[in-house]
Amino acid sequence: MKAFLALYLFLVVTYFTGLSFQEPAVTFPSSYSVRVTVQERSKPSIDPLITTFKGFVLKYNNSDDFNYIIESSQLAFLSLLDSSQIHSFYKSIPSEDGSNTTSPCIHVNYNNAPQYIFSRQLNVLFSQMFSAKNYEKEEENLFLKLNNNGDNEILRSYDQEVNEKCIKQRLTILTVNAMNETFALCVKPLSVDKFIPFYLISQNLVVTLTDFNTNQVDIEHEKYFLSQMSNLVENCNFIDRNYASAKLKDKNSKVIMNTQPKENLQNIFKVYKTTKSISSLIKNTKKYTSEKLPQFITKPQKEHLWFLSPIHTCKLSTIRDPSACPKETVNENKPTCIFLHGAGEMEELPPQKTFTKYWGDVIKYTPQCGDYWFGRRDTKTNGWDVEELQKYYCEVALLGSGPNTTTIKNTIVFTHSMGNLILASGIDKGFCKFDLNTSSWYTLAAPFHGSKIATALGTICYDYYHNDFPFNLKALLGFIATVGNYCKKNSPDAYPAYSTLLPTYCSKEGICINELYAIADPLDKGRICGDSPIGLLTHYSLALEVVSWVANYGTQNDGLVPFPSCQMDEQKEFYSNGPSVEWYGAYSNHADITCRNGDGWFGGSRKPCSFYTNKV
């Protein structure tokens, strides 16, 4: 989802070249193409191959639809001729030793499903970015001031990328506020009402725009674009999302595979190979006037403007400009932060100082912490009711509390998924307890009322092992078995830890899963629950969505945990307009919530990593 949504932002930006702001009508450039490079700076320590995205955006002169490809080592996205059709290509996933691939390439036709909830916000973003008055006001108030001679003087931003790429290069900085975020657009003016954009910068990404063609689609751009997409369409296993969903829920479903989207793409490529142009395939032109544009949303308060406010920006190492921010002070009284993972890990290790494979760059999002410890235990074969596991989790939670104590002091504890149940069980048995005056506990994606995940995974693993699915869904289940790693190798069984998550499960000692919330509720200070198995659209999205289809939760879920099982108390209101709240309902899946996939590129409900920031 990240790459797709960001592309919409690029498309908006590219409108500006040659765009006239004169009233009453707003007209779009007839055609253009542009090369884009996106650096996801919220995850700088991770392999650049999966944090840098490259691609092209193309718009033809008689169409309001966009064609784009953006690629990483794992994913490619396409919308061709019809912007309601989103094609996601999940590329082969290399095995850990690099010797082979563990999954074939899969082409999923999403048919508008992932992005429909953003249609209103994107329309608002369009309307705000098309207002020249909005730009002028923001530029004057936030980036310019009068010096003693009465001349404009550029203020220094707290964001290192804005300073390096925009201010030092003497570009004009415009700002756009939408969806509780601010974007800096760095442009070179051509005239009073026309300019060329060079950079688009936000909290999470830096977009570089090059090779502009404003009168027509560049033939080299089109050639590369179509050749890449033709290769993906021809060589990947095509999955109609609606067909897969119906068949995975009910093998006897009479639903028929809709192959029309793939056939349409194949026809486009066939025509292109003959005519060397696809512009003849595009028809219809719309005119947009300012009167028809949506109303502006309320602008966010300045403390929400990440790259302008020192309140947040100067505390995050991925954004902070040391020359503009106040000097950092060392606080020896900062609490210790503890991170306890959920089901799915195999290694038995002593507490570690980092665990990026599971928690991503969460350390960079938690400047409030003075020290960090990450638990590492086998939670595939061991469920939450294993006493040795409960003792270990309590021992890790006590690492910042001093010797010879069972009271957690001056500590912030973050527990994910089954980790919430393990720690709650350890507290119930007296292995540790919280001093709520000096410590806090934040619960993440907690299955307090269990989940049908065990049944769903059992079905997936069995059917994959016995090849008990029609058409090419074998490839889809193979993707789940290898990427999710839920199934035992060479076995029809899922790992046993997941069976302890059933809503009816009780331990041998008689403690039932639905009793653990009563232990955790008086102690936890905040919680994040996910409501989308697709989430930020990484390679986890497809796996978790398939699990969600098979489980058939009947309610919003993060792929593994139903939202009500995480929320529990309906009187406890969760908010999705920004991550600074204590009770956060995020458009994120179960993996996203750990911070391993970074923040979403825009949208207040898509910031799981920022939820950890300044939680005390």
Image (tube, rainbow, N blue to C red):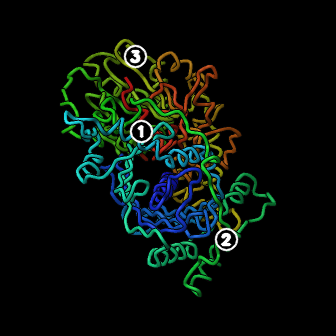
Of marks 2 and 3, which one's residue comes earlier in the chain? 2
Identify the residue at image location x=48%, y=26%: 581
Camera-near label (1 vs 2) is 1
The reply to whether residue 22 is in sight is: yes
Q: Say the numbered circle drawn on residue 434.
A: 3
Identify the residue at image location x=38%, y=43%: 203
Residue at mark 1 to residue at mark 3: CA–CA distance: 50 Å
Image quarter for residue 392? top left
Dot 2, crowdedness within 10 Å: few (<14), some or many (≥20)?
A: few
Identify the residue at the far front of this view: 150
Dot 3: element: strand
Q: Between residue 42 and residue 25, name the one nearer to us.
A: 25
Dot 1: element: helix
Q: What residue type is labelled 1?
A: Lys
Percent position (x, y) of residue 340?
40, 33
Identify the residue at image location x=59%, y=78%: 278
Q: Is residue 312 left or right of residue 519?
A: left
Residue at mark 1 to residue at mark 2: CA–CA distance: 38 Å
Which residue is label 2 attached to?
Answer: 283
Does residue 276 lie above or below 404 as drawn? below
Q: Between residue 28 and residue 110, name the one nearer to us.
A: 28
Of marks 1 and 3, which one's residue comes earlier in the chain? 1
Identify the residue at image location x=37%, y=48%: 201
Image quarter for residue 353? top left
Which residue is label 1 attached to?
Answer: 137
Does residue 242 lie above or below 362 as drawn? below
